[in-house]
Image (cartoon, rainbow, N blue to C red):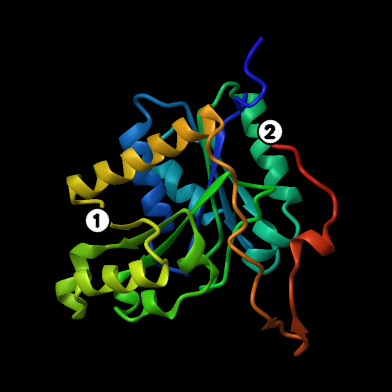
Amino acid sequence: MPDPVTPTRSLRLGVAGPVGTGKSSLIATVCRALAGELRLGVITNDIYTDEDARFLRSAGVLDPERIRAVETGACPHTAIRDDVTANLAAVEQLEADFDPLDVVLVESGGDNLTATFSPALVDAQLFVLDVAGGGDVARKGGPGIGRADLLVVNKIDLAPYVGVDVEQMVADALEAREGRPVLALSRSDEASVQELRAWVLSMLAAHRGGTHEPQDPGPMAPHFHADGEEHTHDHDHEHPHEHSHA
């Protein structure tokens, strides 16, 4: 009989960040680096399309059936934090269809700096920024930047063209994160790709060993929808039902 603390399902890894930071490209990079040794699946989120899923399928990084899309029909953070039902169902169906899977990557739709995943949906999460968004973004903080399991400063090969000092951006990120890990990444830089690969493998090992506990990076900051009313989301109070990770 297996150790009761040892997970019997995949590591569910969330990938969040603003529009255009390279979340889909990062997932493709992870798949290329690890598909030869791990059994992978991907769930993408878009508001009204399956664009990201089609991009990944066309890239040939996995069997197309292992890449599935959720059309959220609402703010991206709603489907990854406030009501995770559609994403959780998609993840569980993928796991059932390809049992066993080692890792399922769940890509958020592009959102702002406050977007984080509910721990009811993912076991760990990384947040993606890119140098083209500006070197000052990392020090602006927010739940995703400050408390995701890993912060990725992406597209560092573009830094000379947009006038960004990558070392300073990483230093700002480390300060904002109080020393939590930061990875400067370019898909064309093999050393950084190997660092990303090693991080995923270490997180999988911790998940399997029962030494990693999913963390909640914090509630969404108050924000405004088209109705002009202020909305504050609290996953624990608005959605008291619990999801088991066992």
Q: Amino acid at mark 1?
A: Ser
Residue 147, percent from left and from top: 50, 62
Is residue 74 toward the left or the right of residue 123 in the image? right
Q: Residue at x 41, y 66 (%)?
A: 178
Q: Amino acid at mark 2?
A: Gln
Q: Residue furthest bottom?
A: 228
- Of the residues tagged 1 and 2, which is closer to the observer? 1
Secondary structure at badge 1 equals: loop
Quickly name the residue at label 1: 186
Q: Residue at x 19, y 63 (%)?
A: 157
Q: Residue at x 64, y 65 (%)?
A: 77
Residue 132, percent from left and from top: 30, 74
Please report whichever mark, 1 or 2, sits nearer to the chain's N-terminal start.
2
Residue 24 in view in this figure: yes
Is residue 219 toward the left or the right of residue 66 in the image? right
Crowd rating for badge 2 (residues with CA inside 10 Å; few <14, some 14–19, many 20+):
few
18 lies above or below 88: below
The CA span between labels 1 and 2 is 32 Å
Crowd rating for badge 1 (residues with CA inside 10 Å; few <14, some 14–19, many 20+):
many
246 lies above or below 111: above
Figure quadrant of the N terminus: top right
**Quarter of the rendering containing residue 239:** bottom right
**Quarter of the rendering containing residue 117:** bottom right
Q: Residue at x 29, y 78 (%)?
A: 135
